[in-house]
Amino acid sequence: MATEVMPYSPPEATATRADRGRVVIAVLALGWLAGVLWRLWLGSPITHPIAHADEDSYMNAARAIAGGPEGFSSETPLFRRIGYPLLVSPAFVFGPDFATSYKIVHVINAVISALSLPLAYLLARRMFGLTTGIALAAAFVAGTVPAGVFWSLVGMTDSVMAPLMLGWFLAIHWWVGAPARSGPAITVGVMTGVLYLVHIRGTILVGVYFAFLVFLLIRKRVGRRAAGLSLVPLMLAVVLNQVVILLIGDRVHLRGDIVGGGTMAVFTEIQRLQVFIASFGTNLWYLCVVTGGLAGLAWVATTVEMFRPARDAAFRWTAGLALVSTIGVGLGAAVVLAGLVDTQSDALYSRYVQVFVPFWILFGFAVLADRRLRTLVRYALVPVLVLVVGGLVIAYRLRYVAERGHELSYGMFGGPDLMTMTAGWSEFRPYVGTAIGLAGLAVLLAATRVRRLVIPLMVVVVLVNGVTMAVMRDRLIEPIGSRFSLPVDLGELGVGPDDAISYTRRISNEAYYVLYHDVYWTEFTPVGEDDVPPPHIEVMIGRYHPGEKLHWDGAEHGFTLLQASDEAHIAVWRRG
């Protein structure tokens, strides 16, 4: 009769492991807290929504869920998702005015966005098998990458998408590695359902997940019971989305109308097909630039693993799912952008794929730490090709359009991180982006060949991320925050919930969007075309252009001037 003997573990070794675990937890907790405070500092110049009209739509829906007044939404019935407004709606319950509520939204965003750090660490350890030190360093890189941090500064779904994606991949890896357990299956279903609730990208990911689930069933990687368990929370999320929308009713009226029209023409009209291909290709190029080519390395490693497995099934199929998800979201975004009618085509619109940047940069560092130089050089051919060809094609497209007297849309929300990295404040600079991507890849390949330099190199990348965000705050965030912060405070003027308020037409967009939210007790609607206020209106916001035809003089209608702003070109008037 054989007796099983457990290996002896000295008490000192056990204590050392426990101490190391406590240190890691402390570092992650402090890092998360620092990440929250850092994000709040970065977003401090922003007092009102800046990403119009998407951000306004989410804030209006959250306000309505919290019992506030009616408001508009730029969403369409098909694309409408209520998860993010539901998440931040408590801000409008406890906030006494919009400015306070909006800051509470920023806190919620920061708390969730900063979770990218611990989630990235768990992925680095469990999926990629990195050592504790390298995993921590890589997690800080992923947790501070500008593509994930920027969106936490605004009230949009993207503020929480990056940690949700990391959590989803972590749950998938857990489930495929333990297919017989119910907990991982349910967790995957919950994460997939939350992604569905948050944004239309979640719908694309649900489609990818269904295909993945069928694949797992065919390969007998999971059982039918586990597959069914994973679908239950997903179905509940779909139902919850519709229930909340029905409860809100017409208190949020939709203005969006982008489905149909040009969407079906994407694959039948040459021009729209070109926009589709260009949008998708530009986003692949973008991912390689902002990750220093690491995304491309990770794509190659994933593809090789799919056809020549060297790791366990959990790693292989999670990596494959991530690659298919990136391609699926990129293609879906390109279809939507190419299908937009009566709008200017974008030179760059990376918002939809930015959520994948933390994962791919983490994966890329894992590839660097695990592969020989000869293998890495072969892998590097793909990101080099994407960077060089992508940069040339983008530059040609810009020049081609300009020669015909047109221009492509290019602005802050198309790719704020790339704009900052390339100093492309007024123009898209694809050659600079390509040069940055190639230089970054070369440095990363060379420096990581010396094992002692891996962690210091990652620390440098974290510092670069911090500097990039500081420059972005100075050049992009502060100016646009100032632009959408009016010198008029309705509360200080005694204007509040007891007042019936309206405004004249043709006030500036800045004034309209700011005041739409500052008037938090009712929907902010204009008077008629004649700009004559009805008898019940007690306060008017009017155009202020003294001496010009555009000026609106409230005194002619029996109003007294409370405050006027030459800067904002608006004036506040009270009847009597």
Image (cartoon, rainbow, N blue to C red):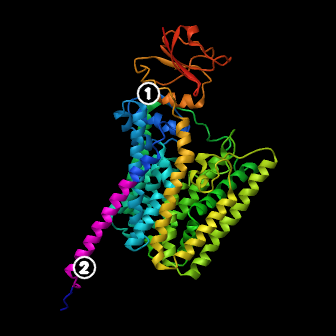
Residue 137 placed where, x, y %? 43, 67
What segment is highlighted magenta in the picture? 6-34
Q: Is residue 213 magenta?
A: no
Dot label at residue 13:
2
Specify whether residue 218 is in view. no
Q: Is residue 13 magenta?
A: yes
Q: Are marks 2 and 1 in contact (CB under 8 Å)?
A: no
Residue 489 placed where, x, y %? 46, 26
Q: Quadrant of residue 53?
A: top right
Nearer the observer, 432 or 294: 432
Which amino acid does the dot numbered 1 rest on? Tyr
Residue 157 placed where, x, y %? 48, 46
Please identify the dominant SS of the magenta region.
helix
Which amino acid does the dot numbered 2 rest on? Ala
Is 25 left or right of 48, judged from the image as shown?
A: left
- Residue projecting furthest to the bottom: 1
- Tag 1's secondary structure? loop
Residue 381 placed where, x, y %? 64, 73
Dot label at residue 520:
1
* Viewer-side label of 2, 1: 2
Q: Residue at x 62, y 65 (%)?
A: 437
**Badge 2 or badge 1: first in the primary sequence:** 2
Is 414 left or right of 160, judged from the image as shown?
A: right
Specify whether residue 254 is in view. yes
Q: Residues within 10 Å of mark 1 (few under 14, many from 20)?
A: many
Nearer the observer, 332 or 416: 416
